[in-house]
Amino acid sequence: MNVVDLVVLDVAGTTVQEHGLVYRALAETVEAAGGSAADVGRWMGADKYEAIAAMLGRSVVDDEFADFHARLGKLYAQTPPTPLPGVPEALARLRSAGVRVALTTGFDRPIVDGLLDVLGWGEGVLDAVVCVDDVPAGRPAPYMIFRAMELCGARDVRRVLTAGDTVRDLEAGTNAGAGFVVGVLSGSQTATELGAVRHTHLLPGVAALPALLLQDS
């Protein structure tokens, strides 16, 4: 029997190599609007609208958010995102063993839809995708995890694994009460940074999940 029913994964830096372009686009957006992006790193894993608003010190940043979308689109066109090594195989292995797989992300739906198209992750690759604009609040709130559980029919949060490459990912997993809260070292935050917050495991990347979860792996 599998030890989990559902694996909930972050996108950028966890399942997808996007070369840090989202934070480059964030910084450029904020600086173009006259703000300082010196602390852009603290917004890793967060709602990007919230991040822009906080860095600019305003509550409404619709124009700046549109600018962020445009900048990120151009960057992705120049350097298309790719799956991180071993991730497609891990997703397929988990799903073939009856474990459902969902993505959650601080990106909004238009960005995610374009990203999935570039990756070729259409039908048959994932069981659910939850974006920050699908829930009342992004990480570290647990709502995206709960929404993924709802979409995938998972009823016991103790049989849910969450994994991500940022402190906010781990905080969201802990706040949700997930049985497994995994930090992966495939992003820009270090083992020291991730290890400083509550977690159950630190792994090199998502490719290591089948060996952790499936007895015959």
Image (cartoon, rainbow, N blue to C red):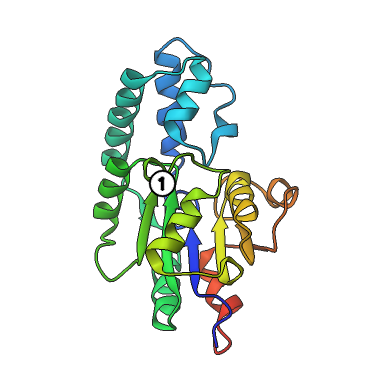
Across and down, in percent, residue 5 comes to 50, 75
Across and down, in percent, residue 177 comes to 63, 59
Across and down, in percent, residue 176 comes to 59, 55
Looking at the image, is 205 positioned above or below residue 215? Answer: above
Q: Residue at x 32, y 47 (%)?
A: 112
Helix, strand or loop status at disc 1: loop
Instruction: Give the mark count.
Output: 1
Q: Residue at x 47, y 51 (%)?
A: 144
Looking at the image, is 70 positioned above or below residue 95? Answer: above
In which quadrant of the rendered view does residue 74 lie?
Answer: top left
For this orientation, the residue located farthest to the front is 155
> Which of 181 and 14 lies nearest the eye of the viewer?
181
In which quadrant of the rendered view does residue 78 lie?
Answer: top left
> Which of 22 and 102 lies nearest the eye of the viewer?
102
Quadrant (top left/top right/bottom left/bottom right) for the N terminus = bottom right
Across and down, in percent, residue 192 comes to 74, 48
- Which residue matches tag 1? 18
Q: Residue at x 55, y 50 (%)?
A: 142
Quadrant (top left/top right/bottom left/bottom right) for the C terminus = bottom right
The answer to whether residue 9 is left or right of residue 177 is left
Question: Tag 1: residue type?
Answer: Glu
Whether residue 173 is visible: yes
The answer to whether residue 5 is left or right of residue 204 is left
Looking at the image, is 46 positioned above or below residue 151? Answer: above
> Which of 110 and 74 lies nearest the eye of the viewer?
110
Looking at the image, is 140 positioned above or below residue 176? Answer: above
For this orientation, the residue located farthest to the top is 34
Q: Residues within 10 Å of mark 1 (few under 14, many from 20)?
A: many
